[in-house]
Amino acid sequence: MSWNVKRFDELTTTELYAILKERTQVFVVEQECPYLEVDGKDLLSYHLYKEENGEIAAYARLLPPGVSYTEASIGRVFVRKEYRGWGLAGELLIRSLDFLHGELGETKIKIQAQEYLREFYGSFGFTAITDSYLDDGIPHIDMVLEK
């Protein structure tokens, strides 16, 4: 398995297709949430992903400041169903934070997390800054990590 981080214009069409296919599978089909998954932010983002047997096993979209929030952000985080329970979510988040802190020099990261993942993100130092609210019918909270 190999990890990759690429800007949008560095992705091959095959890589982009695989990423968008898996994101749609998780966020639209699996979570039964019809919304505009391709939202225009990909062009300004970094794409961190792990390949396994030609599939996207884990993925996160890393957004520089000013794309989603004033702060840098991490979004579209998923581990493909077949690879859950392997510890990839934690590894994915560590690599995301390392890139944002180390490569981009960011000190504050804001995320919109599904409520049930509050403790997971909290274990990496994120703290909730909002009460739970519904977004596309799913409970979410906003969280921030300051280094």
Image: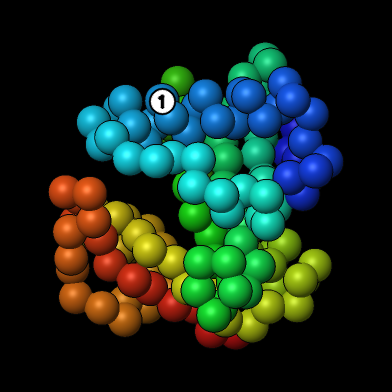
Quadrant (top left/top right/bottom left/bottom right) for the C terminus: bottom right
In this picture, is 27 found above or below 63? Answer: above
Quadrant (top left/top right/bottom left/bottom right) for the N terminus: top right
In this picture, is 88 found above or below 92? Answer: above
Relative placement, left or right, of 100 versus 10 is left
> How many numbered discs sit on the rendered protein?
1
Residue 31: x and y, percent?
27, 34
On the image, which quarter does residue 50 sit in? top right
Residue beneath the point at 39% across and 31% down: 26
Residue beneath the point at 74% across and 25% down: 13
Residue 141: x and y, percent?
28, 67
Q: Which residue is mark 1?
A: 25
Q: Amino acid at mark 1?
A: Gln
In this picture, is 95 found above or below 106? Answer: above
Front position in the image: 56 or 39 = 39
Residue beneath the point at 32% across and 25% down: 29
Relative placement, left or right, of 108 versus 104 is left
On the image, which quarter does residue 58 sit in? top right
Residue beneath the point at 16% across and 48% down: 137
Relative placement, left or right, of 122 versus 31 is right
In this picture, is 104 found above or below 51? Answer: below
Residue 81: x and y, percent?
41, 25
On the image, which quarter does residue 119 sit in? bottom left
Tag 1, which secondary structure? helix
